[in-house]
Amino acid sequence: MGEYLQMRGIVKRFPGVLALDQVSLSVNQGEVHALLGENGAGKSTLVKILSGAYGKDEGEILLDDQEAQIRDSHDAQNLGISIIYQELNLVDELSVAENIFLGRPFMKRGAVDWGRMFLEAKKLLDRLNVDISPRERVGRLGVAHKQMVELAKALSMQSRILILDEPTAPLTRREIETLFSVIRMLKSQQVAVIYISHRLEEVLEICDRATIMRDGRNVAVLDVADTSLDEIIRHMVGRELKEKFPKIHVPLGKELLKVEGLSAGKQVKNVCFTVREAEILGIAGLVGAGRTETVRALFGMDRKDAGEVLVDGRKITIRNPLDAIRAGIGFATEDRKSEGLVLTMGMGMNITLSSLDQFGPPLKINLQKEQKAILEYIKRLSIKTPSPLQRARNLSGGNQQKVVLAKWLLSRSRIIILDEPTRGIDVGAKIEVYHIINELVRQGAAIVMISSEMPEILSMSDRVLVMCQGRVTGLFDNDGTLTQEKILTYATMGDKQSA
Amino acid sequence: MKKSMKIAVIICLALGLMMLGFGIYAGSLGATSQALKDSAAAYNRAMAQVKAAEVLGKDTADIEIPEEVVLTPQENRLIRLHDMKDFFLIVGIDLLVVAAGAFFLSLHRKRQRDKGQELRKVSSGNNILGILIAFIVLCFNLALASDAFLTMNNFLNVFQQISINFVVAIGMTYVIISGGIDLSVGSNIALSGLLMAIMMKYWGLSVPLTILLGILFSVAIGVINGVMITYLSLPPFIATLGMMYLARGAAYTVTGGQPLYTFPKGFTDVSSRVAGIPLYGILIMLAILLIGWYGLKYTRPGRFTFAVGGNENCARLSGIDVNRTKVFVYAFSGFCCGVAALLLASRLDSAVPTNADGQEMDAIAAVVIGGTSMKGGEGSMLGTVIGILIIGVISNGLNLLGVPQGPQKMIKGALIVIAVIIDVMRRRSAESAG
């Protein structure tokens, strides 16, 4: 079995940056090939060249030993290359079938042959073993089903090479299983799959080989069967990582936050929990379990129907985020770009946005004092930025997350809610974020951490709260006996009850 | 330096030198061109005399007819070339300036890169530098093209032309940075001006009280805009469009469409000249500019305006009262309209329902040329000021050069589009570099 796709000596320059330096990638037919590297290593650039989104400056691409000219995404499509981006590329207003055959509808006597289109779409969806109606509007589907629609679209184009960019990020464990079985099926049909993911455990599970990139260069090509997580991480970051999760143990203090009977809408039903000083409370659950909704209601972002919040034993009323901030609560949201940061503003101004009252009266901000505080936090959290004026948009994911954390540190929050604190940031930056969390714990802050990454929950939390369908289904001390399986059982408990 | 940039600089340099050469050559043709023109004119004059004599039946014998001069196409071209010498010189100098600017900029970038500094990707400072250079080049050209441009009289003239837009655009900058738009500014000025007139003439209120109430009224219109946009969740475009018609209609209604003339002396004094200079007007404009600039940079409402325009969700999550910020922004725009109404009515010594018609578009144009993003979240007061000056100076220059209104409007339109294209390109390159 020859190597179906070969990319050799690919060079790509952006203004002032050498994004890819003599990068090679070869993928066999019927192989799932992982493309790994930290953010900014050049993975996306490489697949964008393959899918025709970017042109290459040097190098050659061979398909089946034939030189392939990929000038635009149309060329790539004709050569059987399909890419499924993390942010899916579907038209919400159209039906599933229309999306699958977008731009190439079945025609009969000059009109669209709807019957045939729905039939063909159904066939494709059946091949993927998913139960979606071809007539359903895509906007009404969940993320997992949308992804399946994208896969059906790729199938319909007879793709020989399928690129998946972080496909599992928004999926629950069960949905990931479904995705993997589809990938295995494609593999058996001799499709070459290029799999990009930050979740290395999954890579070990599904991939055959892995090409690891760092700073725009190839570092290693490994056979997944003969490698270990640690070896992969070492190649990715270029240094040995003693611990992925540097958890520290500090004696817990008094109870700082108490939530009683919190209810909001359909997603949050009678949630109760407490957090003590220097404690990390992990909240686990499947996507849609109401975890984010719970903390949003707690923070005053969404209206709550019932429930009491006590900080330091005193009952407080939270009607809006300002009330919550005044009570010493900070909230680093799941989606940094749409909620956590003002991307158009300087990163420094993002840090001070909720603490401007520390820098003088409303009509006189002391810019020198502000600048001093900003520089102090850049140093303390080792945020990499050329200047405090650098727009938040231009920072890497890890540094953006640090800016968000700096904002809540500066506003003197004693209770910090972290919603997926390490989503979409690379291994090195993840560890730095954990160190910042540790620093907070050392200072006696109470941390509420929502995470979909089980290892993160299990390694960092002192206690774990499990939610399902808006209810708390379990609360455990993380004393070493808690396992992923146990959490999953409780996270799906509500499902079984309602089924 | 990027290859395309290099080529562009070389082309600019070559074209500039060529134009300059043309210009100098055309200038050197002065004597020849004049001689040819004179001889042609002398012949034509003589022929006209002969014709006149023939018509009158006089004897034509004693009219001295010079040798017939027929200008060859080459000679005609020569004359035209000489007439265009100014154009060649100016364009040539511009191109050389652009080439030199680009060259030094890339040199500067290279030095930065060699020092290992990461390139400053997007910074509003860079952007202001660009429009500032454009403005200087523009003034330079006009000074070359027209002797009347660099005179005190013309300066005061430009100043008077831009004064209303100046004040309104400062308020508009806040609105656009907050991610909104205010179409009601022109009508607000007209209605507020008429109300001030009514208060003084019919109600007999004192001048200071009139000014105070007039400005408060304009602020109230802004507050209503803000409330419609926040608490009733109307899109800013619709809310202020409605207010635009409402206020304009009210302006026609209050006086039955009639203008009001002659105000008390205290009122017109606001625009009176001290030692030939409209001192109070200038002071008011500078005061508004100072408030606008200071507010944006040094106050919490100013900072919140950027945050709300950049990311409303994040602003709310950071404890900012988004609704209050928006109401403030439209109220400030209304305040600027009130001040503009005062300036306009006192200068014209009259209030007309059609006053400041289309003012909203001029203000938006100035803000956009000044590099403020229509998407909100980005912009600067300094940019707006330069934007206002560019619009004012261009229309003044075109007037001086005798360009009719039609082409003037076309040039203004092209200018806005070009300014935004440059801005979009700059943003795109900055983003792809990151």
Image (spheres, rainbow, N blue to C red):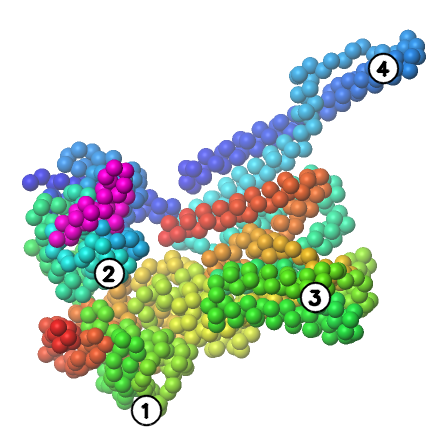
Q: Are marks 4 and 1 in contact (CB under 8 Å)?
A: no
x 51%, y 69%: residue = B228
Say if A105 sits above or below B299 in the image: above
Q: Judge the density around disc 2: few (<14), some (14-19), many (≥20) Cα neighbours within 10 Å.
A: some
Q: CA distance from mark 3 to mark 1?
A: 62 Å
As rendered, which of A485 and A477 lies closer to the eye? Answer: A485
Label annotation for residue A313: 1
Instruction: Determine the residue located farthest toward the bottom in the rendered image.
Output: A313
Asked if badges 2 and 4 are on one and the same chain, I answer: no
Q: Is residue B347 left or right of residue A309?
A: right
Q: Judge the density around disc 4: few (<14), some (14-19), many (≥20) Cα neighbours within 10 Å.
A: some
**Chain of the residue under label 4:** B
* Circle 2 or circle 3, nearest the eye: 3
Assign a secondary structure to mark 1: loop
Q: CA distance from mark 2 to mark 4?
A: 92 Å
**Chain of the residue under label 1:** A
Image quadrant occupied by the N terminus of chain B: top left
Write the start and end of the magenta stretch as one range.
A98-126
Q: CA distance from mark 2 to mark 3?
A: 56 Å
